[in-house]
Image: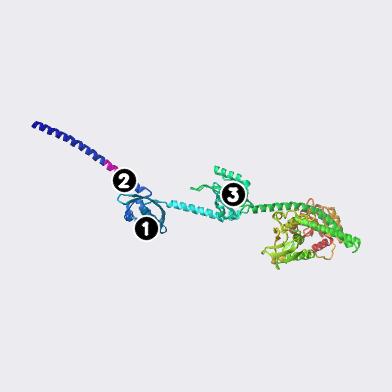
């Protein structure tokens, strides 16, 4: 029995040893595993701490209690940098974060916090904090986690968005400057469109150009607003292509609609603008071509007038030679015929006809030339008073004449005859327009020290726009056949341009017409130097030796006879070359009458060589076309005077005597 008991005790001891050994080994393994877990936890915490310290955002845990008190459970080191306080102090007092908030943003910040605590809703805030005097922008986001004990744990992050805000502000400032600039550009209409054509931007110049205000235009489709029906399909297709390819519509001239239904010509350019975060926007830049088209039309008008003027000038030159011969011989024979005799009356009629023809040709020359036929001081008030005296004898029963003349009107330089003819044309047109009577007003005024203005105004029928646009065209007239040539206003235009002036016509149907002529003025201080030194004065007849140079046989024979009738000794030659040769051979002359338009050297070439050969010989430049080149030539050399054809015997003698005395 004892042995049995001992055996049993021995077996139990052996089993106990095995159990202890097994449990010891398990315990050692558990300790080792626990040590591994603790090591992993330490490594994980070290990594977490390292991440929290290095992450560029602030991380926090705030515990709020049922009594609405709250405080940090955790705040990462970045939190201290973001709010500009010591980390330990911030962890102890969460209110230090509130104190850093910008005063202008604090109320909103507090309100969001209160709402979050009250309603347990996520908290999102963007605002400013002041850190050491500098302003930062922060974005704070946190979400609530209710706990079993009634507390709420807020998991949050804080991000510095200062650079983003600065970029956004810079973008807004840039866009503001851009749009402000576009608003201030007075002559360029700019519109912004979405891809579907909806108008998104409309500057002030667009309002003036098209008549729609920005409120009326923005939100509407450009196809409905500006594009004429016949262009809509093409413009829509061009827009689709533009958005598909990214290539802007080519610039071009377009005729677009205005609010009142009228058309306006514009030069339209396009650009696609891509702004990050937005849909692409088309900017359309339109320039009003109205003034350019008007100037182009004026240029075409000027070119047309110059072409017609050249033609008229050439014809007038030849006719003047014929009239000069007729008038010269007729006036010479008047001197030797008994007054009242049939022969005297015949030559008197011939002279009057030649003078009348000369005035007609002079009108053509005024139309043709680019400078006045004469250059003298002109009193426009005196011309208008003379016009009224003439008109009163013919129009007083039809229209009433009014003079509104500035008493101290500045003088101007020009051709009295051409200016008188131009004003008479305007007055006759005005009278014709007042078929049932009315008032014709002639007005003058000084615009400033440099310009004067003459107005011819009536209250007659007026002109529709299509007639007004063609009023200055040569041969355009609304009068019946036989009642007008259509050259009246064209000649007025040419006269004004020849005097370096400007013309403006304002007219509306039923409202009458006002024609304004503006000319360069002469200041009173300049008048003594500007007085005409070549006023014709009949002096004592002195026998002169005259060398007449003209390629036209009619002129040589007729003017030669006139010179002989005046008692002068005339030598006639057909060219400048022969005249110079005769002078080199010893021919003596007191005066030379030199034609401007001749083959070979012509008047200009002959005069240049003559001044080397005979520097003091007086010269009368005789021309049927007194253009700018003739005036320039007369002013270039001393003792040279211009003698327009045709001229009478008395005019010729006066000029010869005056030139000889001077």
Disc 1: which residue: 99
Magenta stretch, main secondary structure class:
helix
Q: Which mark is residue 224?
A: 3
Q: Earlier in the sequence, mark 1 or mark 3?
A: 1
Question: Is residue 44 located in the magenta-colored stretch of the structure?
Answer: yes
Q: Is 568 situated above or below 238?
A: below
Q: CA distance from mark 1 to mark 3?
A: 57 Å
Secondary structure at numbered mark 3: helix
Disc 2: which residue: 46
Q: Nearer the viewer, mark 3 or mark 2?
A: 3
Q: Would residue 104 be found to the left or right of residue 236 on screen? A: left
Q: Position of residue 348 (x, y in %)?
A: 87, 61
Q: Which residues are magenta?
A: 35-46
Q: Nearer the viewer, mark 1 or mark 3?
A: 3
Q: Position of residue 555 (x, y in %)?
A: 84, 55
Question: Is residue 448 located in the magenta-colored stretch of the structure?
Answer: no
Residue located 21% across and 37% down the image: 25
46 or 331: which is nearer to us? 46
Q: Which mark is residue 506?
A: none
Say whether residue 118 is visible.
Answer: yes
Q: CA distance from mark 1 to mark 2?
A: 32 Å
Q: Position of residue 347 (x, y in %)?
A: 88, 60
Q: Nearer the viewer, mark 1 or mark 2?
A: 1
Label 3 crowd (10 A; few <14 / some 14-19 / many >=20): few
Label 2 crowd (10 A; few <14 / some 14-19 / many >=20): few
Asked if disc 1 and disc 2 are in contact, CB closer than 8 Å, the reply is: no
Q: Would residue 135 be found to the left or right of residue 602 on screen? A: left
Label 1 crowd (10 A; few <14 / some 14-19 / many >=20): few
């Amino acid at each position: 029995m004892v042995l049995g008991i001992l055996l049993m005790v021995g077996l139990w001891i052996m089993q106990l040893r095995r159990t202890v050994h097994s449990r010891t080994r398990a315990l050692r393994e558990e300790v080792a595993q626990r040590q591994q877990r603790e090591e992993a936890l330490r490594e994980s915490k070290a990594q977490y701490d390292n991440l929290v310290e290095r992450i560029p955002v602030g991380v926090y845990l705030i515990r709020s209690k049922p009594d609405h008190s709250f405080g940090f459970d955790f705040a990462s080191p970045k939190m201290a940098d973001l709010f500009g306080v010591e980390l330990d102090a911030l962890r102890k007092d969460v209110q230090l974060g509130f104190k850093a908030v910008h005063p202008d943003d604090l109320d909103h910040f507090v309100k969001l916090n209160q709402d979050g605590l009250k309603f347990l809703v996520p908290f999102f805030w963007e605002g400013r904090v002041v850190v050491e005097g500098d302003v930062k922008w922060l974005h704070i986001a946190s979400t609530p986690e209710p706990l079993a004990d009634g507390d709420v744990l807020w998991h949050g992050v804080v991000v510095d968005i200062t650079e983003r805000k600065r970029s956004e502000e810079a973008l807004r400032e840039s866009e503001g400057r851009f749009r402000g600039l576009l608003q201030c550009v007075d002559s360029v209409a700019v519109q912004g469109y979405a891809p579907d054509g909806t108008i998104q931007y409309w500057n002030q110049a667009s309002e003036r150009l098209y008549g729609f205000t920005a409120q009326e235009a923005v939100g509407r489709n450009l196809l409905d607003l500006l594009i004429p029906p016949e262009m809509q399909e093409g413009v829509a297709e061009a827009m689709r292509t533009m958005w598909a390819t990214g290539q802007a519509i080519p610039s071009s001239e377009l005729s677009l609609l205005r609010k009142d239904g009228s058309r306006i010509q514009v030069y339209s350019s396009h650009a696609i603008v891509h702004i990050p975060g937005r849909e692409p926007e088309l900017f359309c830049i339109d320039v009003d071509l109205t003034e350019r088209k008007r100037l182009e039309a004026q240029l075409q008008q000027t070119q047309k007038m110059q072409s017609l003027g050249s033609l008229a000038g050439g014809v007038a030159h030849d006719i003047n030679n014929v009239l000069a011969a007729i008038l010269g011989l007729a006036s010479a024979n008047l001197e030797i015929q008994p007054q009242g005799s049939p022969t005297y009356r015949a030559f008197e009629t011939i002279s009057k006809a030649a003078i009348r023809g000369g005035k007609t040709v002079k009108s053509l020359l005024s139309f043709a030339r680019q400078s006045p036929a004469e250059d003298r001081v002109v009193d426009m008030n005196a011309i208008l008073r003379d016009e009224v005296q003439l008109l009163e004898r013919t129009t007083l029963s039809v229209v009433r004449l009014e003079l509104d003349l500035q008493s101290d009107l500045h003088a101007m330089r020009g051709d009295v005859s051409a200016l008188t003819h131009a004003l008479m044309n305007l007055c006759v047109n005005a009278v014709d327009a007042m078929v049932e009577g009315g008032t014709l007003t002639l007005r003058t005024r000084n615009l400033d020290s440099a310009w004067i203005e003459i107005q011819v105004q009536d209250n007659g029928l007026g002109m529709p726009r299509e007639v007004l646009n063609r009023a200055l065209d040569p041969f355009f007239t609304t009068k019946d056949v036989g009642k007008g040539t259509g050259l009246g206003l064209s000649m007025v235009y040419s006269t004004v341009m020849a005097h370096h002036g400007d013309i403006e016509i304002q007219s509306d149907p039923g409202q009458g017409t006002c024609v304004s002529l503006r000319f360069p003025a002469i200041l009173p201080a300049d008048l003594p130097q500007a007085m005409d030194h070549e006023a014709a004065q009949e002096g004592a007849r002195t026998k002169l030796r005259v060398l007449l140079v003209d390629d036209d046989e009619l002129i040589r024979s007729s003017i030669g006879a006139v010179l002989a009738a005046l008692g002068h000794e005339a030598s006639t030659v057909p060219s400048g070359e022969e005249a110079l040769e005769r002078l080199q051979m010893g021919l003596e002359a007191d005066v030379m009458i030199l034609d401007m338009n001749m083959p070979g050297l012509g008047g200009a070439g002959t005069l240049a060589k003559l001044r080397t050969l005979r520097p003091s010989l007086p010269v009368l430049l005789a021309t049927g076309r007194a253009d700018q080149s003739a005036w320039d030539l007369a002013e270039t050399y001393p003792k040279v005077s211009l003698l327009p054809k045709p001229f009478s015997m008395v005019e010729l003698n006066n000029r010869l005597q005056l030139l000889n005395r001077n």
